[in-house]
Image: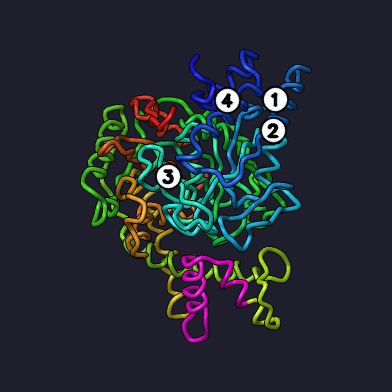
Amino acid sequence: MGALHELTAVEAWRLLERREISARELAGACLQRIEAVEPSVRALLTVDAEGALRQADTVDARRARGEALPPVAGIPVVLKDNLCTEGMRTTAGSRILERFVPPYDATVVARLRAAGAVFPGKANLDEFAMGSSTENSAFQITRNPWDLERVPGGSSGGSAAAVAAQECPLAVGSDTGGSIRQPAALCGVVGLKPTYGLVSRYGLIAYASSLDQIGPMGWTVQDVALLLDAIAGHDPLDTTSLAGSARGEDVTGYLEACREGVQGLRIGVPREYFGAGVTPAVAASVRAAADLLANLGAIVEECSLPTTDYALAAYYIIAPAECSSNLARYDGVKYGLRTRELAGHVGLMEKTRDEGFGAEVKQRIMVGTYALSHGYYDAYYRRAQQVRTLIRRDFETAFKRFDVLLTPTSPDVAFRIGERADPLAMKLADICTIPVNMAGLPAISVPCGFVDHLPVGLQVIGGALQERMLLRVAYTYEQATGWHRRRPVLPGT
């Protein structure tokens, strides 16, 4: 057995269950790793060493009493810092919430806490989850563990980098337009965006409510399945939560779904995902993955999703419109930052928002407000929602013919910090992931190769509530390759 911080979540669970290691030993190893690599990676905004060790001791005591514990018990899980945590600072990567300490846990956090997960810290992100590189954080730029001069992706870049740097076996992210899958691809880890409504959004600081979804990140497909088992399920506090149990649907057993075998499965490869912007090397890696699955017995065919080319434009009307509405609550009155330059009620709000929001957030608020304004609602917002319906229908048609679809996760590997100052160039980083959010579907990114020593991600897309199918295909591919076993080497380690 190597160093404890090198364990995958499933490896750690099995050792903990057999009492070959303790939760305190595992938490201590991860905290030591955080101390060693954080100065170079900067994945975390908050580290809670005392709290993590206290949680670990509680798990060890429960296990010593002979309690049957869930697989996630005793395993360190880093939380993206847009998930509310009772008594622990939650910033959403923004100055406007720099000192905000929530009085309650998000449902996902509460479920993990009850299951015995250990929380070593909160991960950096693009401010309010708006970005694709984690350069938009108000506090620091997170660096890609594979190359410290490059971005980890975003907006869940801190969560992805924390796993890739082996600071923790598991992390939780949120995905509005690719914010779990894209950083997972750029950091060489696995990230799963569940079906919209499968995981409660209660306590997630909202960006775009009809698109946001919380999901797991880890080193392996089994790792993310283990975490999904702990956080999925209906929540009456979230009005968009799927009432699966009421409909007789099973929303557990994802770890058991990780089994090899794709014989006879029908896999589609949409040609639109290999167009302009997707580098030849990335496209070649993804097509090689499709060929491998075909050799394992799957039926792989090219297909078409004609409205894909409109997804990016429609997304950047719908998401900012919802952002404009959701961020109206930050007014300097109820909570969060309040400007010291008071100038009446209106002036207080304007000055607070000017000081508290970063440039990217301001831009999206203005775009969204314009799209919702009188005289432009029909021309922009309504039309974008109509395009969204067409995108959803495209997927529905495809899934009548195929079990899953394969695409690149990101059109390119990790780019250099500061390289994409052009806002349009940055937004194109999500071109392969946005359609999935528009349709509310599940998708997973798994490593499928390296280009210039940087990871490439393979995206597997499924129909609504087809997470088990995704996990089966992804696990089969993962076990037939060795990409998930590679680890970056960081300075001083």
Instruction: Please give the name of the residue rendered at 60% of the width and 67% of the height, measured from the top-left corner.
Output: 326
Q: Which residue is mark 3?
A: 143
- The mark that comes first in sequence, 4 or 1, is 4
Q: Please, what is the dominant secondary structure of the magenta stretch?
A: helix
Image-based side of 362 in relation to 340, left or right: left
Would you say the residues marked 2 and 1 are in contact, meaning their CB atoms lie under 8 Å apart? yes
Q: Nearer the viewer, residue 420 or 394?
A: 420
Quadrant in which the C terminus is drawn = top left
Residue 283 place in picture, x, y as percent: 25, 44
Q: Secondary structure at mark 2?
A: helix
Q: Gap in Å between the C-alphas at discs 4 and 1?
A: 21 Å
Q: Residue at x 55, y 39 (%)?
A: 171
Q: Do labels 4 and 3 touch, CB within 8 Å?
A: no
Instruction: Give neighbour class at mark 1: few <14, some 14-19, many 20+ (Cα, 10 Å).
Output: some
Q: Amino acid at mark 1?
A: Leu
CA separation in Å, label 2 and label 1? 7 Å
Name the residue that disc number 1 marks: 69
* Amino acid at dot 4: Ala
